[in-house]
Amino acid sequence: MALGALLIQKKYHYSDEEAVAQIQENPYLQFFVGLPGYQEEAPFEASSMVRFRKRLDEVTLMQINEKILSYNPKDDDNIPPTDGSNSGILTLDATCAPQNIKYPTDTELLNDARTCRKDRR
């Protein structure tokens, strides 16, 4: 939680009080610092940020950063082939495909309703 709070504070240039307030108000920031779910109360006091900075000084943060950057999962399945072949996994998303659906705000629906009534008379 301390590392996440310090990263948030550094990224957005928040003061101690503002960092705690932002974490308190934002569910995404609460998730980032490791809270199990959204909570309305502040996860810690603003004075705790001073203790966090003392425990996680610049040298420790650089060591943590180096460990994160050096982490390399052994997931060779997602590496594209370099031999020029077109093999692999293709993931498609149909949410952007055009559909023949008319919405209630479509003026053509209104025109169809108007012309059908006129033909019935």
Image: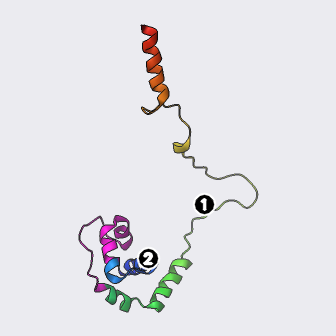
Q: Residue at x 54, y 42 (%)?
A: 94
Tag 1 near tag 2, CB within 8 Å:
no
Coordinates of residue 81 in the picture (x, y in percent): 70, 59
Sequence-earlier tag: 1 or 2: 2
Q: Amino acid at mark 1?
A: Asn
Label 2 environment density (alpha carbons within 10 Å; few <14, some 14–19, many ≥20):
few
Closer to the camera, 60 or 98?
A: 98
Coordinates of residue 51 in the picture (x, y in percent): 32, 89
Coordinates of residue 66 in the picture (x, y in percent): 53, 83
To which residue does mark 1 refer? 78
Coordinates of residue 20 in the picture (x, y in percent): 31, 77
Q: Amino acid at mark 2?
A: Tyr
Foreground tag (1 vs 2):
2
Q: Residue at x 64, y 62 (%)?
A: 79
In space, the residues marked 1 and 2 are separated at their CA atoms by: 33 Å
Q: Is residue 24 magenta?
A: yes
Q: Is residue 114 magenta?
A: no
- Corner quadrant of residue 82: bottom right
- Corner quadrant of residue 1: bottom left
Residue extending furthest toward the right:
84
- Corner quadrant of residue 96: top right
To which residue does mark 2 refer? 12
Q: Which residues are magenta?
A: 19-48
Residue extending furthest toward the left:
41
Compared across the picture, whether 17 is left or right of 120 comes to left
Q: Could you say whether the residue bearing mark 1 is in a helix, strand or loop?
A: helix
